[in-house]
Image: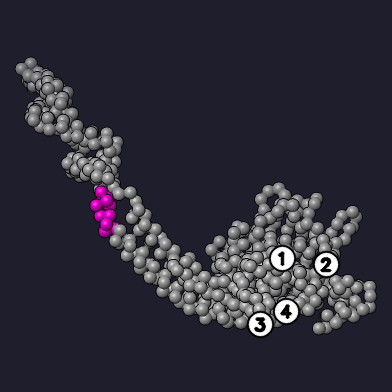
Amino acid sequence: MLTTLRIQNLALVEELVWELSPGMVSVTGETGAGKSVIVGALNLVLGERADRSLVRSGEDKCVVEAVFQLPDTRKIDAILEESGGVACEDGQLLLRRVVSLGGANKQFVNCSPVTLQVMKAIGEYLIDLHGPHDHQSLLSRDHQRHLLDAFGAGVDLHAEYRLAWKTWQDAHNRWKQLRDSERASEQEVDLLEHQIKEIEAASLDDLDEEQMLDRYRRGTNAVRLIELSGLIGDAVDGDDGVVARLGDVQRAARELERLDPSAAELFSGLDSAVIELGELSSGLADYRDEVEIDPQEIAQLEQRVDVIESLKRKYGDTIDEVKSFYERASERLHSIQNRGDELERLEQEANRAEQSVREIGRKLSEVRAKAAPKLAVEIEANLKDLGFKQSRFAVDVEALDTPGPHGLDAVEFQFMPNPGEPAKPLRLIGSSGEISRVMLAVKSALAEQDQVALLVFDEIDANVGGEVAHAVGRKMQTIAAKRQLITITHLPQVAACGGQHFVVDKVVEDDRTYSKLREVSGDERVGEIARMLGGSTSESGRQHAKALLVG
């Protein structure tokens, strides 16, 4: 139940703390007194869009807080856990909405900031609000189907069906897309085959591009490399080269050492220099032999380089990019060549998914067929209580030619308000007073299945009066025995049925207008009911009001 509603600076309300009891709560007041502020506040904590014009004139923000006491918070805790919020403690839930004239609006659940989507998701489990035009939802065949599923405990089965139906549609669309796609032309197949063969012929898997280019560069520059290495070799080990001259140096050094042994240190590196120069000469000879590449090999390398560069111009800037192009071309060719096999596989997948849809759909249809007459009987009985003494009500479940997104059948509520007339779909019933009472009858029938904590009826009893108004009030009392109910009403017969009664007054203080809410009981409540009857100053009006409250 909603235990407390706090409103600050919303429209004509400056400050309001509203403490509520279980059962049926009546809210009354003169037209324009500000009863709609309560609905506006509840809409804010339901996550509806905030209109900044609601902020009281002269203030920079308005705040609405709602405190709920819930017997089971598991669904709401799951939403909060997924969004990173704070779970409920001891069954208590606090919703807070702040609407600012400047800056962003804010919303909190259990003092933790949340997105508007999270607040809206939570609100769906808390409040079911019906205004003068909200009964229009009852005219929707989709909403009627949902009500039947809720009554027959088919909501979970419907969710399972929806998942299976989506799987089927996805599989069918994949098959249809491939079936209807433009067939690959012979030119595309020929081109793909040419591209694949051209890349395969290059044997890129075993290619060391850097090594190949190095070998190619040495081959094309072989003449100059041999020439340069020969010049160096002659300078090192020729008849008049460095090695021959070092021989003369060695002989002179030995003679010097013989005459002056102390000079030996000066020539410690001379022998190693001679050895290293000899190794250099030998290495240059080997290098010349290696550089002398066979002209045929040079031609082969040149051809290989040309092939690689050609592939890179056509299919990618690098060898890796050329390989990636090859993979894509191979996959595309495989897809074209195996199109028939893929079509068959997708068709079988779609057929299996359709079979699953039909199996689950049959179970859902059985649940609906079993629940439909029971729901019709329940609603019909409630309608009789609401003044339709000889009306008939039916829940029509009609099989569809093909499985739909919500089952194998369509649901339509049929209503015959007067005997002798044919039953008509609810959407063809013109009277808003009749539709309002039908909605109340439906809510009564679904009272056991409906898990929403609070029902709010905002003047849905318009266009009814007399004994029917008594019946509407009693029916609300019946619903309120199972859940909390707030009714905002102009009918004294309905207001008198409430366990609590609050009056909204509009007052002017210091040239400012305020809406205020006060609880009435005893003589004060008698006076309010008498006012609604139009005879607040007469004794007969007060006696009539007392009679309504008694009974």
Nearer the observer: mark 1 or 4; the answer is 4
**Structural crowding at the residue carrying mark 4, measured as other residues with C-alpha within 10 Å and reported as few (<14), some (14–19) or many (≥20):** some
Mark on residue 381? 3
Where does the image place residue 475, in percent across and percent down from the top left? 71, 79
Quadrant assignment, res 470: bottom right
Q: Amino acid at mark 3?
A: Ala
Q: Earlier in the sequence, mark 2 or mark 1?
A: 2
Query: Marks 2 and 1, how far apart in space?
Result: 17 Å
Q: What residue is shown at x 90% (from left), y 80% (from top)?
A: 543
Question: Residues under labels 3 and 2: Cα distance?
Answer: 32 Å
Q: Which residues are magenta?
A: 331-342
- What residue appears at the point 26 percent right and 43 percent down from the top-left corner? 188
Q: Is residue 148 left or right of residue 360?
A: right
Residue highlighted by disc 1: 132
Q: Nearer the viewer, mark 2 or mark 1?
A: 1
Q: Say which amino acid is labelled 1.
A: Pro
Say which of marks 4 and 2 sits in front. 4
> Is 68 contained in the magenta span?
no
- C-alpha distance separating marks 1 and 4: 19 Å
Q: Amino acid at mark 4?
A: Gly
Q: Which residue bears the numbered disc 2?
A: 29
Residue 298 to residue 504: above or below:
above
